[in-house]
Image (spheres, rainbow, N blue to C red):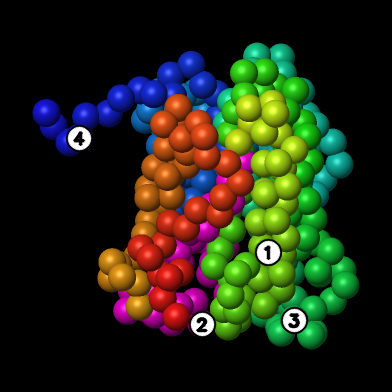
Amino acid sequence: MSTDTVYPILTGKRALVVGVANEHSIAWGCALAFRKLGAEVVLTYLNEKALPHVAPLAEQIGAQLLPLDVSQPGQLEAVFAALAQQGKLDILVHSIAFAPKADLQGGLLDCSLDGFLQAMDVSCHSFVRMAKLAVPLMTEGGSMFAMSYHGADKVVPNYNVMGPVKAALEATCRYLAYELGPRDIRVHAISPGPLQTRAASGLKDFDHLLAEAIARSPLGELVDIEDVGNTCAYLASPYAKRLTGSTVYVDGGLNIVA
């Protein structure tokens, strides 16, 4: 039997994937994996500037496309109102993060209050807001995913304010997993290794981080967005129905190396 055989184990499921900016986005890797396994996919785009980059991707997989800037009042509610009109939701992917450039590239001691609060709101609390709106639509249970990074657990030079913010996000996933378990809703934080995405380009000396990941990881190579997407697809499938509350590393084993 061919090892390339694909079983449509997510047929009949609907996934909302938030955070696709272009074809290099982690969220796009998730959308591809879900669609490949039979799920219906709904994508969001940040603004009119992002639309020309996201619309062709949505068309490629036959995905519905909705506008969403979580910092704008009412937009998140509008997305879920549109979803509610069409039926249930089974999978939610939160793959968005933001901090003002000055606060991201400066040390934590120099991070402004406004910058810290903005980073926490967009990168962490928006996941709580999404989860609250998603729960009524997950009538048959479901899976929720939020994207983290190893800098949440260990100090990564130049990750700065995003380290504490991602640590809060991982704790949020654990507490949501606890609260939503009785509803058969599973929640995971996903922690990919360094990836060349638009968001990562804002980090100082990111090229050095990529090179170091290759040199130090047990598998000796970088992961890609498909690796992350396939992991989320597995965790959303019946094969992982007893798994919840984990921070799942998709990094070639880099996190185990001192």
Decide if residue 41 is on the left or right side of residue 75: left
Could you classify mark 3 by the number of other residues whose Cα lies within 10 Å: few (under 14), some (14-19), or many (20 or more)? some
Q: Residue at x 79, y 78 (%)?
A: 111
Q: Nearer the viewer, mark 4 or mark 1?
A: 1
Q: Which residue is mark 4?
A: 4
Q: Earlier in the sequence, mark 2 or mark 3?
A: 3
On the image, the x and y values in percent for residue 69 come to: 73, 45
Q: Which mark is residue 205?
A: 2
How many angstroms separate mark 4 from mark 2 (CA)? 37 Å
> Where is residue 82 shown, x and y percent of the image?
71, 22
Between the residue at mark 1 and the residue at mark 3, the CA separation in whole angstroms equals 14 Å
Q: CA distance from mark 4 to mark 1?
A: 37 Å
Q: Is 181 inside the magenta-drawn segment?
A: no
The mark nearer the N terminus, 1 or 3, is 3
The type of residue carrying mark 3 is Leu
User: Between marks 2 and 3, how big is the CA–CA gap?
Assistant: 17 Å
Q: Amino acid at mark 1?
A: Ala
Lower sequence index among marks 4 and 2: 4
